[in-house]
Image (cartoon, rainbow, N blue to C red):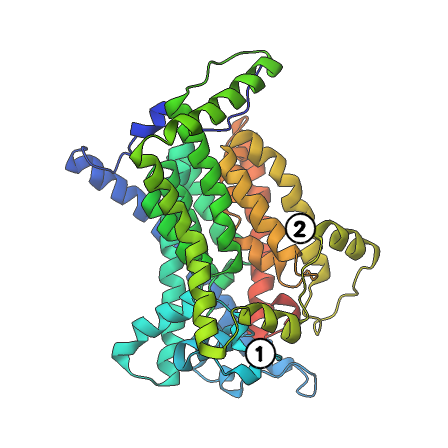
Amino acid sequence: MKTIHQSTPPSDNVEPLSEEVGFPARSRHAAARAIVANVFLPFLAIRLLLVVVGLTTIYYILPLINRKQPIVTDGRLSHFPDMLYLMWIHFDSGFYLTIAHDGYWGVHTLHAQSNWGFFPFYPLVNRLVAFPFGSAWLTYQIVGILVANIAALIATIYLYKLTTKEFNNAIAARAVFYLGLFPMSFYLSAVYPESLFLALSIGCIYYARLRRWWLAGLLAALAALTRPSGVLLIVALAWEYWNVLGDTFAPLKHSRDFITFTQEWLRSRFTGIWRSLAAWRTWRGFVALAFVPAALALFMVYAKWKVGAYTAYFMTQHYGWNHSLSNPIFLMFYLLQHPSPATPYDWNFYGLNMFSTLLFICLLVPVFRKLPAIYGITMLAFIILPLTTGKMDSVTRYYLTLFPVYMLLAWWSSQGTQEQQLRRHGLIAVSFAILLSLGIVLFTLGVYSIA
């Protein structure tokens, strides 16, 4: 019987990546050249192509728009060189910039669409980077784009390294390529926290797989301060840590019989964690996991100090955006029964968001089957949380950060005969590229539905 890979064997505790310590300089140089060729150059090429599409949109489509329609673009968007940076600043970008430039607003804004509805780490990074260059609004706009692109590049490097660890260099290069072409990947260069959150999330899982719990916990904590979904990284980390403790202190005795294997797995996990409590290093790992809720608590304490309410974020989401805790299953059934008509003035791109949600839910099964469970747990958490708000607005943008999908697609398109591989790769690349081109056009024009 084939057993599903749920945890990493004990040998992973000492498995270094090829570019870590102990390898000769020639191997390190080869690894660096591979990252440049497989990560940096594709990333740069796709970003430049997005700029070209955006500029083409401004010059050839923007002048054709009826000026009396509800979507009003910034007049400077038609002027060069202002268009080079304004094309990346739309929708929620203004909230992040106000937090970075002026801080969070006062208590009187909590019952409206306040900037308290957004998490602080991305604006904080922008403020720290912009500080030496002055307080001009333009400075913060440029810095916001710069930080987003640097974070996106770091995310692609970590995705490459992580996929190399789980598969090989060729699959890793393809995973990075798919991330760059994902239909919503233009947000990686916009004044949004998606790229920073993606870099922190992948880095968290990368170091968890290397058993470097303090780094994993720290990155998870920073992710929890970047987007609400980051808080759920503690579930994935706790699962991985639990399995490692079981493998270390009560190793599995493998069996081909499913019932026997299940009993053995439960014995290993519960006996292992009980035995591990006597070891000091176990408790250090627990402290590392505690970084995540501590980060969220820190944000809530700051809100209490600033506006007198620990729940400032939740109040703003409820009163300003009409978001309330909902059962995601009920939400899906309701939206399937009540489809929304296609309109550029609706903040919910119903067709795209519904298709993305159903597709990624279906992809959970192969992710759990092909990759260690930490990836499936991370993906499941990131899928569910946006659906608990009672709305489906922007979920395709949120699902941009579902990095296990890029790993899975890269593996799938590398299987079979050469002809099958080319067909699968072409299907993914062409469909992604077409949708990405349409997405950047709508984003550049400021069409609500792509938000």
What residue is at 57 percent from the left and 30 percent from the top? 369
The quadrant holding residue 345 is bottom right
Query: Marks 2 and 1, how far apart in space?
Result: 30 Å
Check the image and report above or below for 184 versus 3.
Answer: below
Residue 444: x %, y % from top left: 55, 72
SS assignment at label 1: loop
Q: In which quadrant will I find the N terminus?
A: top right
What residue is at 66 percent from the left and 56 percent from the top? 388
- Judged left or right of residue 76, residue 320 is right
* Residue carrying label 1: 110
Say what amino acid the circle numbered 2 marks.
Answer: Thr
The answer to whether marks 2 and 1 mark residues whose Cβ atoms lie closer than 8 Å is no
From the viewer's side, name the closer residue of 103 and 356. 103
The reply to whether residue 225 is in sight is no
The reply to whether residue 52 is in sight is yes
Q: In which quadrant will I find the C terminus?
A: bottom right
SS assignment at label 2: helix
What residue is at 72 percent from the left and 58 percent from the top? 351
Residue 311: x %, y % from top left: 55, 68
Q: Residues within 10 Å of mark 1 (few under 14, many from 20)?
A: many
What residue is at 51 percent from the left and 67 percent from the top? 53
The quadrant holding residue 138 is bottom left
Check the image and report above or below for 160 versus 351.
Answer: above
For marks 2 and 1 on the same chain, the one whose residue lies earlier in the sequence: 1
* Residue carrying label 2: 357
Check the image and report above or below for 331 versus 370.
Answer: below
